[in-house]
Image (spheres, rainbow, N blue to C red):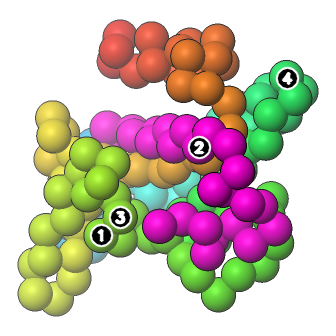
Amino acid sequence: DFQELFVDRDLSNGPLSIVTLSQNTVNDMSAWSPSVEEEREEILVKFIEGATEICNALKSAGYWADFIEPESGRPYFGAYTGSTLFETDHRYKKLGFNINDLGCCKVIVHSVWGAYVYVGSLFTNAPIDHPVITKLTQYNEKQ
């Protein structure tokens, strides 16, 4: 389901771990307002910085890693593709999220935080028990 996003990578050859990076937000992301827009922009910058750092750590350990740039829906490091993965894409249902159709728009819903969430995704061939990934999981459990 994700091969078309990573046109320069054969995802069928080897393991694929998908790590969702969820940030609890102050604002309800199902409605637009200046404060929602401001919060999304602030989190976007932090997400790109953090995801880049994580990918670089995994690459330094000899693995492939990339993440989806939330604004474009495309891989950050990979080759350009016409395919996208936005936070309201139905594939996020397979990753444990609900997607609510509000009529005018769709919104991603976290199992704990509801629509008060900003979600990003990182893809790697590192095993899910790799120290970089387990450190993320442990950090998330403390939140």
Mark 2 and mark 3: Cα distance apart in space: 15 Å
Q: Which residue is mark 3?
A: 91
Q: Residues within 10 Å of mark 2 (few under 14, many from 20)?
A: some
Q: Residues within 10 Å of mark 4 (few under 14, many from 20)?
A: few
Res. 116 in view: no
Q: Residues within 10 Å of mark 3 (few under 14, many from 20)?
A: some
Compared across the picture, whether 101 is left or right of 24 comes to left
> Which of the 4 quarters of the picture holds residue 84?
bottom right
Q: Where is 134 relative to 67, above or below?
A: above
N-term mark: 4 or 1:
4
Res. 102 in view: yes
Q: Amino acid at mark 3?
A: Arg
Compared across the picture, whether 17 is left or right of 99 comes to right
Residue occupying the point 45% across, 19% down: 137
Mark 2 and mark 4: Cα distance apart in space: 16 Å
The mark closer to the camera, 2 or 3, is 2
Mark 3 and mark 1: Cα distance apart in space: 4 Å
Secondary structure type for disc 3: helix
In depth, the one of 93 and 138 nearer the eye is 93
Q: Which residue is mark 1?
A: 90
Q: Which residue is mark 4?
A: 61
Question: Range of the magenta residues?
Answer: 1-25
